[in-house]
Amino acid sequence: MVSGNSRAALLMLWGLLCCMAAGCSEVTQHKTDSRVFPNDYPTLHPQYRQWPSPARGITVAVNDPTLMWPRVKGKDVLYDIRLSADSSFQDSGVIAGEAIPWTVFNPHQGLGKGLWYWQYRVHGKQWSPLQYFRVSDTAKDAVSASYEKFASAVPAAHPRLLVDPGDLTAFRASRSASPEAARIIREADALLKTPLPDDTPLRDMLKGHTAYQSKKLNQYRAKHLGFDVRDAIERFAEAYLLTGDKRYAERGASWTTRVASWDPDGPTGYSDFGDGACMEAMAIGFDSFYDLFTPQQKTALLSSIRTRGNRFYTSWVNDLDAKVLSGHIWQFLFHNLFRTALAVHGDLKDADTWLHFLYDVWLARAPVLGGPDGGWAEGMSYFSINTEVLLDIPTVIKHYTGYDVIAHTPWYSRNAYWLYYAYPPGSGSDGFGDNSEALLGPDSIYLAYADALSKLTGSRVAATYARKIEEGRAYSLADTQVLRWFRLRYLWNVSRPDTLPDGTLPRAVDFPDVGLVEMHSDLGRPAKDLMVGFRSSPFGAYGHMLADQNTFNILYGGKPLFYVTGAKLAMQDPLRLQWYKATIGHNGILVDGKGQLFGPDDYGWIARFLGGNSLCYTVGDATMAYGRDGTKDATGLRRFKRHMLFLYPDIVVIYDELKADHPVTWNWIIHSPGKFVLDSAKGRFDVSAAGVSAEGRLFSPVPLTWSMWDTMTVKGVVWMEKRSMGGKKGGSPFDAWHLRADNAGKVSATRLLAVIRVNTGAEPSPDPAGFAPDSAGRINVGGWTITAEMDTSRPALLTAVNHAQTTAFSSGGDALKVGGQIFRGTPGASKLAEKISGKWTFHQKQDSIPVLIQNIPPARDTQKTKP
């Protein structure tokens, strides 16, 4: 028997030999890195930072790179940092920081070209091993402003949070007659008649069926009380600043002092959201109605704000800065404390500490769940509650310092592509992430965000997205509360860029940083669009991400055809944990009935993406998602690569490479809102949903057994009416049909090939007899001939050639032959040849690895003092 370490070494050697034979660019590109991914690589996005960056000689993309290092646990830990072009740190140009309470350091200055060396340490103790990186001529110059410059620009006078004190008169004169102002005033007028808020009812605790339900019910009430008072005080402040009418200021001041009278450790502290909203509410009131408070009232306000603010800061420092994700903080609480610190800066000493921490961490970390590709790892639903913070904080920084965070952060320029492709106007979303099943079409939140994004970045994609939402829905931007004051203050008289002509955008786009591929047959016409979303994410299944690596969702006309099932009632609800978050609730693979694990360790990635005029192809690798060796949940999985091939406009091919270290039962699962009609003898299934019919065939080298059912293994009970569960009205959000195929006898390796055709009306309906292979194993369907290598002793290979001999695709091999042409390329690379407007094009793509790998040291790496 081969030991775990010996086995890893053998696999590494085997992978290296294969990669060398295929001419892998990754091996030659990183000559100092002999690892073969994934066998000896750690988690890509660990819960807490485990290695310093930038390091290992990588070339930084931005000149003014943020330095980050692993934390040492403790709330009183301080760090020292030193950075120099001299590895001995003896020259006069050393950039240093001492007694830093958090694990990030922004130099706030450009660095010379060449190698730079740096070290960190716990304050006064031994320095870390030497780290180094390179600044090249290609690095983008983006020197951020120092915190001192930012803080000194914050006005000393009030109000300042919603408008600069010196601009108030001009602001009022220019904005008070706008449609947005009219809506704000109407809302404030209605609130004038509303009684002062009271936290007393929250002291009578609600009881659920379980202790967890009781906790969540009371947290939910506390959250909404906080949100309600914050929104009301903000509305009074906005109306007052727009009109000068003292009625709004007096009523707002009364609400503010009422909140200050509440015990910070009382009912509003049951929920961190409620706590943060109450803190921000008082800060808005303190700043906006400053002259109406007595000295005693100001003292009471600042005392309550200080208690709540320090509670957040002390729990975040030396934690949030080193943590991959703290969902509640980045969604709302970060913004709550940032705005609070701005409002009371200079009045409350602690606010300067809060603001310095938030400023440094924002520049270093945001956006936390997206890379340059523009995606958002937690999915479209939870993205919507990040929209304001993602635009407001960088705009405030620019307002005070001139440094344009948005212009210097590539994520913003690409974000509109992810919006458009993952959640098209007039369509449901791609189905990845908590609550995604409830999204029936982009609403006013997405309109407001896309409108603002287009004006801040000049993105025509964002402008087109916003315009398409307006065309499909009767939304008025002026009536949209999200980012309304932001538009009045920062985007006044800024025009939206021109939209793009129909047909400009490609049919498919990949987002490798977050692990998504979004494919469309007709993106510009949602009623006729067949949409295929595929996820295999380096972020894994952390937070509001689900255990859905290498899974897909298919929609037609914006409605689910093959889709995620279940719903999120609460994070720890059994339905979410045992079905909705679990792999069984998705269109994926189980191993002996076991799915993927929940956490950042359990990840996948997009290994290949190749898009063309006639098709799109992608490969996901989820080998790391099913448990590591030596853990109780390990499945023994050794390989899970899923090939997705979308032959436009209506054929989807799924080809799985599966291998374990022992014989197992492989479980192939697919879900639909419609009832399946199953012919198990032929491996055929038909279903009608989303206004269309679809038929599929599943092929396997070994016999399969089938099962079909319409209930989940965990009963779904809506015990907290938070929202329209599953987007359904008057029905259960849990209605769906489930289909599963298992190999009849256990095998250690297998291949599975599924071919699905959707009757969109674009082509004649499929042959009622189905698309059975011919004598040579070729599948002919919809004008295409498809082949797949099902023998596990031979290299995996998937091919497709259209009958018109104008398109040919191969997932590997040496060459393509089509239309009398031969196209040769790199052996093992995926290849696509297409004849477009009478001219042939040829593209190829090899496996790629996540760019993060360049900065992660091997487990046994001994860091050198010099490169």
Image: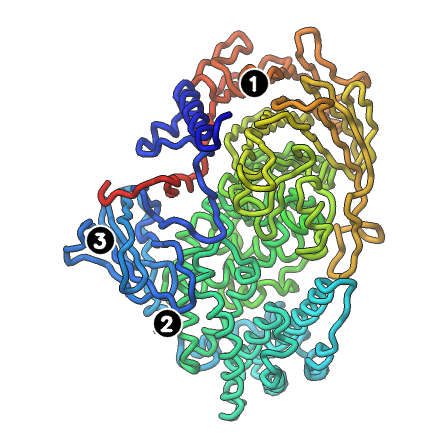
The part of the image, by quadrant, that contains residue 58 is: top left
The location of residue 643, given as percent across then percent down, is 59, 27
Between 212 and 787, which is closer to the camera in this rendering?
A: 212
Horizontal side of residue 687 vs 233, given as left or right: right
Within 10 angstroms of label 2, few (less than 14), some, or many (20 or more) residues? some
The residue at which mark 3 appears reads as 84
Task: Name the kind of residue labelled 1 in the image.
Answer: Leu
* Mark 1, secondary structure of its residue: loop
Q: Is residue 369 visible to us here?
A: yes
Counting residues from the start of the chain, the first of labels 2 and 1 encountered is 2
Q: CA distance from mark 3 to mark 1?
A: 50 Å
Q: Is residue 848 above or below residue 811?
A: below
> Can you tell which mark lies on residue 151?
2
The residue at which mark 1 appears reads as 797
Task: Name the kind of residue labelled 2 in the image.
Answer: Ala
Pointer 3 with pointer 2, Cβ within 8 A? no
Between 92 and 237, which is closer to the camera in this rendering?
A: 92
Horizontal side of residue 36 vs 562, given as left or right: left
Placement of the C terminus among the 4 image quadrants? top left
Within 10 angstroms of label 1, few (less than 14), some, or many (20 or more) residues? some
The residue shown at (61%, 15%) is: 791
The residue shown at (68%, 84%) is: 196
Counting residues from the start of the chain, the first of labels 3 and 1 encountered is 3
Q: CA distance from mark 3 to mark 2?
A: 27 Å
Which residue ends up furthest to the front in the rendered image? 1
The residue mark sitting in front, 3 or 2, is: 3
